[in-house]
Amino acid sequence: MKIVHYPHPALRCQSKPLTSIDKDFHLQVGEMFDLMYEAKGLGLAATQVALPHQFLVMNISGDFQQKDQEMVFINPVLVERKGAIEGDEGCLSFPGLFQKVRRAKTVRIQAYNIKGEAVEVTVSDLAARAWQHEIDHLNGVLFIDKLGVIGKLASRGALKELEEEFRKAQARGEFPSDTDIKQLLDALMTES
């Protein structure tokens, strides 16, 4: 498992609700936390590791030693948004790219925890930004889709570089073709 970078097709995948919590799922969650901490992130959606399922891991502290801050949310849904705030945002699938993004200041989310229990949380500021960012991932929406005109112009060079790096990696055989990746994602979606 590894974090995929833009423009990997999994990042545009409309993920499928997770229907079972089993040993494989728990192993995937553990690997995702390891990858997130290694990349110095606060959250990681399943689509960012090329898994087409609706779940995410998060630790807003960013500190792997604060295990009590670790959260796993399955099939999360944003049910309420309040206010608006603009702030810098980055993404583990877009290394080195940071831009200002307008998000809701406070959000209410419904989801299931790792035990399969229904939970509801209301968060603000950084936590709200992280939640919105990760839930967007599960819907195939990227933070670059939310940029204003100036942010889009400022990001063009970095995005082109990421695209070129990905295509070179495909040419070296590190990744299958986009068509093969999409077929694999479709197969994973029908398995569960």
Image: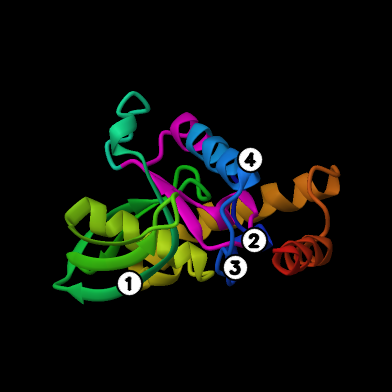
Nearer mark to the viewer, of 1 and 4 = 1
Q: Does 21 sit left or right of 43 as displayed?
A: right
Q: Is residue 108 left or right of residue 183?
A: left
Q: Are marks 3 and 4 in contact (CB under 8 Å)?
A: no
The boundaries of the magenta stretch are: 35-59
The structure residue drawn at horizontal position 84% and vertical position 42%, both measured from the top left corner, is 172
Q: Earlier in the sequence, mark 1 or mark 4?
A: 4
For the residue carrying disc 4, how many other residues have a C-alpha within 10 Å: few (<14), some (14-19), or many (20+)?
few
Give the residue displayed 59% in from the left and 70% down from the top. Answer: 16
Residue designated by label 4 = 2
Q: Are marks 3 and 2 in contact (CB under 8 Å)?
A: yes
Give coordinates of residue 153: x percent, y percent. 42, 66
Name the residue that disc number 3 marks. Answer: 12
Q: Is residue 143 visible?
A: no
Q: Which mark is residue 10?
A: 2
Please tell me in which quadrant of the rendered image residue 76 appears. bottom left
Task: Give the spatial CA distance, label 4 vs label 2.
Answer: 12 Å
